[in-house]
Image (cartoon, rainbow, N blue to C red):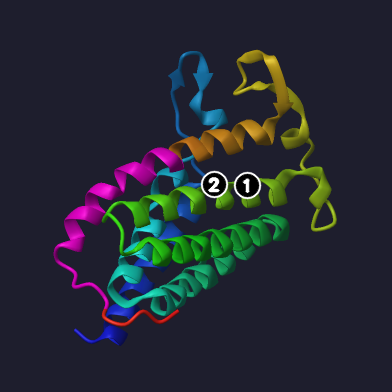
């Protein structure tokens, strides 16, 4: 299969992951863990979003950073279009910015580490990409300092115990949401090594590195 055809397939996969995550983020995870209501912290979108890093890393491994950036841009366009349709502009801007910057960081780190142990590039890239993505999305969406983009969400800014149960530390609610979301992403950064390791044996590594 030619590179152009493969990149189109990866782009469609990325667009599908982004679209699914934007839909599933509307559905909270139901349940209680040690007195913590998961519905107050997590949505199902947190479980599908890490697949974006898997698609990104497989593209980067096979065809290099230039192709990976094209795939990321495809996901960015779909994500922003859906976000502007389904949510307020501030959330759409936060979502698009976080996705683009987080994925581009993943591409950069992966490319620098690609010649090291097979697991290091995808793990480091997705870990730091996830952290940056989460910080940007929740800060731009809810932090008072970004009110110039759109109206503040007073409920998100309200002070409450961390995760709703730890009364010794009170923070704005959006901080608990961000930490809950990030926890899932970090765990899945490790889990995604399994399909990456399995698929890399079927995908020939890229020849030239086009930065």
Q: Residues within 10 Å of mark 1 (few under 14, many from 20)?
A: some
Q: Which residue is mark 2?
A: 131
Q: Where the C terminus falls, by quadrant?
A: bottom left
Instruction: Give the percent coordinates (x, y) of residue 15.
Output: 42, 67
Residue 194 among those drawn in magenta: yes
Q: Residues within 10 Å of mark 2 (few under 14, many from 20)?
A: some
Highlighted range, magenta:
185-206
Residue 30 among those drawn in magenta: no
Toward the left, the furthest residue is: 202
Residue at figure coordinates x 51%, y 13% from the top left: 35
Q: Which residue is mark 1?
A: 135
Q: Is residue 58 above or below residue 8?
A: above
Residue at figure coordinates x 69%, y 18% from the top left: 169
Instruction: Give the percent coordinates (x, y) of residue 163.
Output: 59, 23
Instruction: Give the percent coordinates (x, y) of residue 143.
Output: 76, 44
Instruction: Give the percent coordinates (x, y) of residue 29.
Output: 45, 33
Q: Is residue 131 above or below residue 18?
A: above
Q: Are marks 1 and 2 in contact (CB under 8 Å)?
A: yes
Disc number for residue 195? none
Query: How much space separates mark 1 and mark 2, taking CA atoms?
Result: 6 Å
Between 43 and 165, the one lying in front of the other is: 165
Q: Would you say the magenta stretch is mainly helix, strand or loop? A: helix
């Amino acid at each position: 299969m030619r590179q152009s055809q493969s990149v189109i397939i990866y782009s469609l996969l990325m667009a599908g992951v982004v679209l699914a995550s934007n839909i599933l983020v509307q559905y909270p995870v139901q349940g209680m863990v040690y007195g913590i209501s998961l519905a107050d912290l997590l949505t199902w979108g947190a479980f599908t979003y890490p697949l974006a890093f898997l698609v990104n890393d497989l593209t980067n491994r096979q065809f290099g950073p230039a192709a990976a950036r094209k795939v990321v841009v495809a996901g960015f366009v779909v994500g922003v279009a859906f976000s502007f349709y389904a949510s307020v502009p501030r959330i759409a801007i936060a979502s698009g910015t976080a996705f683009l910057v987080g994925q581009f960081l993943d591409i950069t780190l992966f490319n620098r580490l690609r010649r090291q142990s097979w697991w290091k590039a995808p793990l480091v890239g997705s870990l730091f990409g996830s952290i940056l993505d989460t910080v940007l999305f929740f800060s731009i969406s809810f932090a008072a300092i970004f009110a110039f983009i759109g109206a503040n969400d007073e409920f998100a800014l309200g002070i409450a115990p961390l995760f709703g149960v730890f009364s010794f530390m009170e923070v704005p609610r959006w901080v608990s949401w961000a930490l809950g979301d990030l926890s899932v992403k970090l765990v899945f950064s490790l889990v995604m090594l399994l399909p990456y390791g399995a698929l890399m044996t079927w995908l020939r590594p890229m020849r030239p590195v086009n930065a």
